[in-house]
Amino acid sequence: MPTGQPLSVPAAVTDLGHRIQHWRLTRTKRGAMPRDLWTEAARLAREHGVYAVAKSLRLNFEALKAWTEDTKKARRVSHRRPAFVQLGQLQTLNPPCLSVELEGPGGAKMTIRVPGGGTGEVMALVDSFFNREHRS
């Protein structure tokens, strides 16, 4: 890009710039910019480029780059854990049995049956299953 050329700034970046400027003018003490503003800036940086967004919003390039990478990691990590695990009692003639059925994002399946309805090691097994599934 030739020097002296103004950056083309999308409306969403301009809107966020106004919100950041308002925060800068109205804050009562020095401190870190609020998380929601950083998160929005990181989202826009992934969409329009870290340099362009940092320059337009007068943010530290390295800090914005780190936030952009951190939010990518956070999204990946959030998909590793199940949002819901259903525990149910199997109806048998024997004492009750706890049954847990798991299915990982990659399609792997696992069923855990614990006699007597105890939950002792079930969560450790669930964590182990999803950690293994993520590495595969």
Image (tube, helix red, strand yellow):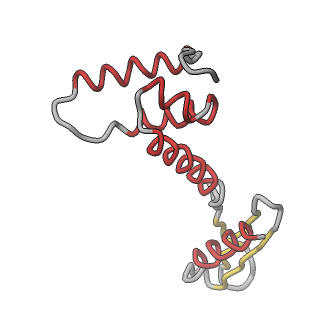
Specify the quadrant of the image occupied by residue 60.
top left
Side of 107 where 57 appears, left or right: left
Return the residue nearer the eye: 11 or 126. Answer: 11
Q: Residue at x 49, y 45 (%)?
A: 67
**Residue 48 drawn above or below residue 74:** above
- From where the camera sits, is residue 25 visible? yes
Return the residue nearer the eye: 6 or 20. Answer: 6
Image quarter hosting the N terminus: top right
Residue 125 location (% of width, % of height): 64, 78
- From where the camera sits, is residue 10 visible? no
Image quarter hosting the C terminus: bottom right
Q: How many marks?
A: 0
Q: Residue at x 57, y 15 (%)?
A: 5
Q: Residue furthest front?
A: 3
**Residue 118 drawn above or below residue 99:** below
Side of 120 where 112 appears, left or right: right
Residue 131 location (% of width, % of height): 66, 71
Side of 117 where 57 appears, left or right: left
